[in-house]
Amino acid sequence: MLQVSRKFEYGLHAVTYMATKGLGRVVTVKEMADEIGFSQEFLSKAMQSLKRAGIATSVQGVNGGYMLARPITEVTVADIAIAIEGRPHLVRCGVKADSCEIFSSCHHRGYMNNLQHKIQDLLAATTIHSLLQEIER
Amino acid sequence: MLQVSRKFEYGLHAVTYMATKGLGRVVTVKEMADEIGFSQEFLSKAMQSLKRAGIATSVQGVNGGYMLARPITEVTVADIAIAIEGRPHLVRCGVKADSCEIFSSCHHRGYMNNLQHKIQDLLAATTIHSLLQEIER
DNA sequence: GAAAATAGGGTTAAAATAATCCTATTTAAC
DNA sequence: GTTAAATAGGATTATTTTAACCCTATTTTC
Ligand code: SF4
Ligand code: SF4
């Protein structure tokens, strides 16, 4: 319950890795996978999600790779979570109303949605910049 | 990602149901399952967890059932989550260190654990009493 | 044209969650 | 004391979600 997905962790590690390499530097998935210690294939999927969300840009072909698309003060942990998992839904009815058999009589929805927004706000409160400072390697 | 388990929702509904019935009243799983619209068997498991955690007490035998063990101002949503799912672990290494292949070189753990505690605090900030008020049926 | 890289569809494997089944025990009522 | 209504809980199965893997296409530099 309430566990972050592996793909999100892959993505977050990739972003902090790229951030330490500087905004202009192009890094390959292979390089990141080796450095961080992740599976290249799966990390590649995470990168594709980050690209689609506009967090990273890619360069194809030989000498290609990924780099951050925006300054690290303007990307939050929430952005990465949303890029990779889509907007989080604490309860299933948020995704699809009729996926819950008691939807019409449920009185908890408001509170749950509230909670969800607060969690999202928590994630949005950390930028990659502040995360790196907190990490202080 | 970050979705609450079904069992937790069962448990939370059961607690708010019992709360509206008053502290002394004994209610059966069958009654709750019918009223709320849940599967009796599965709700029963949730109730057993609530009992073990000291949130509900049970009376066995004919005319038996469950009732709340503590005043609703002293039970929080976090208590229910912990009773049912155990303490939440946002990342797998929280449960078991060697479940993550990059554990020894990971710099994100501190932040993740921090985040986890903040989420737990969010849940702990709502008592059943305040939840009922927020719900205002 | 060869090689190195991203892009991405599709399938399989593993794990977590949810649901069900079944039996034991407790206790009130008759 | 027998029956019926209830909790207690182990065990299994089904379903869903997540993670991993495979394979091919495309892009681009040399
Ligand atoms: S129980 Fe309520 S909040 Fe949870 S999924 Fe169903 S309708 Fe949504
Ligand atoms: S990546 Fe880091 S935080 Fe996540 S499970 Fe592994 S060690 Fe823990």
Image (cartoon, coloured by chain):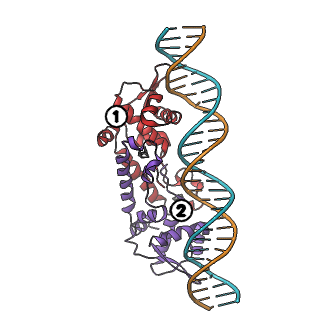
Chain colours: A purple, B red, C cyan, D orange
Mark 1 highlights which residue? Answer: B72
Q: Confirm whether circles 2 and 1 share one chain.
A: no
Q: Report in which chain the residue with disc 1 lies.
A: B
Mark 2 highlights which residue? Answer: A7
**Mark 1 lies within 8 Å of ligand 1 (Cβ measured):** no
The quarter of the rendering in which ligand 1 is drawn is top left
Q: Residue at x 34, y 32 (%)?
A: B20
Q: Secondary structure at mark 1?
A: loop
Whether residue B25 is situated above or below residue B75 in the rendered picture:
above
Front in this rendered view, residue A71 or A36: A71
Residue A108 quadrant: top left
User: In the rendered image, is residue B86 in sight?
Assistant: no
Q: Whole-percent x and y of residue C3?
A: 67, 84
Q: Whole-percent x and y of residue C23?
A: 65, 25
Front in this rendered view, residue B66 or B89: B66
- What's under tag 1, amino acid-wise? Ile
**Mark 2 lies within 8 Å of ligand 2 (Cβ measured):** no
Label at residue A50: none
Residue B21 quadrant: top left
Whether residue B70 is situated above or below residue A79 in the rendered picture:
above
